[in-house]
Image (tube, grey):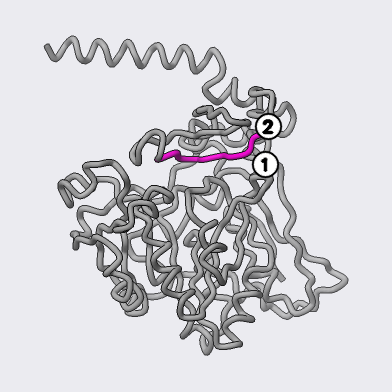
Amino acid sequence: MVTLTDIRSCCGCTACQAVCPREAISLVPDALGFKYPKVDMDRCTDCGLCEKVCAFVRPLPELQLPVAKAARNKDEQSLMRSRSGAVFPVLAEHILTDGGAVYGAVMDEKFRVLHKRAVTLEEADLFRGSKYTQSDMGNVYKAVLDDLKKGITVLFSGTPCQVHGLSSYIPSILREKLILADVVCHGVPSPYVWRDYILYQERLRKGKVVEANFRDKNEYGWKEHRETYRVGDKLYTDMSYTYLFYKHIMLRPSCTICPYADIKRVSDITLGDFWGWQNAVPGFNDDDKGVSLVLLNTEKGRHLFSKCESQLFTRDVQLSDCLQPNLQHPTKPHHDTDAFTRDFTEKGLTYVMKRYGDKGWRYMVYSTYMNIKRTVKKWLKR
């Protein structure tokens, strides 16, 4: 049966729950909302399937070096409604028009991030946009298996661990029509911090949040990471959630030992923002409307991309120009993560934003120090 001696060894992909024939495994959230398996001993027969399907703790298979491309959607409306270069909507459209199904992460009306199935372009349109918190997988793995058993082609998108978990769960005989797309992942932040942050924004703005945008490209351009929140007809911006995210203080523990943070990928296609495009493809994104890095990792991925390439502006690039930090190593953990978790649990979001975030005197002192340091550095260069 599945046992956790170190919580870093579980990425929360849900493969163990999906494979259990006795439905003996449930996923229970911890203090930050990250889900971990819990076994019902009255149901468990110790068949071992949950251990066999756990891909996160096994050595990775032999993987190829990918073919790398810079890409962006030729349709400017589609480009501006996505966060990067709007490549995934083109891939999804091809699968859907061929009668397939597409799975991806959406943000529901309560701003919870979860995975869903789409069989229409309208449904798949909800997959657009960055979502900086771990998605709830629900019973998506079982739904994918049902589609494949019916002969339906499936495009599944998610983090590398979700992708590898699904690949491990699906029997090899059914994988021919399964296409896996992962993202260049920085690590997944806490669902509960995000939940409480929406409530914080509503208290602060004295109204109901009707729209939340982790990265508002329309207001601030592609390269800026600026949160926006719409309350009524007013748009507000804030950076407190982003600050905690990039501080690496509220990430899932497994993210800090992630085996997928490598240029060799477990998916068929990898998508991400193309940071450093200026050196690789000068002029390609001068309008700051967005550009995607595309890694074609398998023949299946290359075949799908070739069918969609007429709808994209693309350039071949060297792998040496694509080596973002999370394509080389996992995100390093923050030394105060345990204290943050304890304080968030006991004292709430406002307290941790003041103690660890950008709302308290510590941040003001640090910010003032850094501004003085930058000013002195510029002065010395004169």
Q: Closer to the camera, 45 or 320?
A: 320
- Is residue 380 at all visible to an observer of this figure? yes
Residues at discs 2 and 1 in contact (Cβ within 8 Å): yes
* Residue 192 picture quarter: top right
For disc 1, the neighbor class at 10 Å (few under 14, some 14 to 19, many from 20) is many
- For disc 1, the marked residue is 192
- For disc 2, the marked residue is 344
Q: Residue furthest right?
A: 42
Q: Closer to the camera, 12 or 45?
A: 12
Q: Is residue 196 above or below residue 175?
A: above
- Dot in front, 2 or 1: 1
User: What amino acid does circle 2 point to?
Assistant: Phe
Q: Residue at left 58%, top 58%? A: 11
Q: Closer to the camera, 296 or 374?
A: 296
Is label 1 in a helix, a strand or a loop? helix
Q: Residue at left 60%, top 87%? A: 149
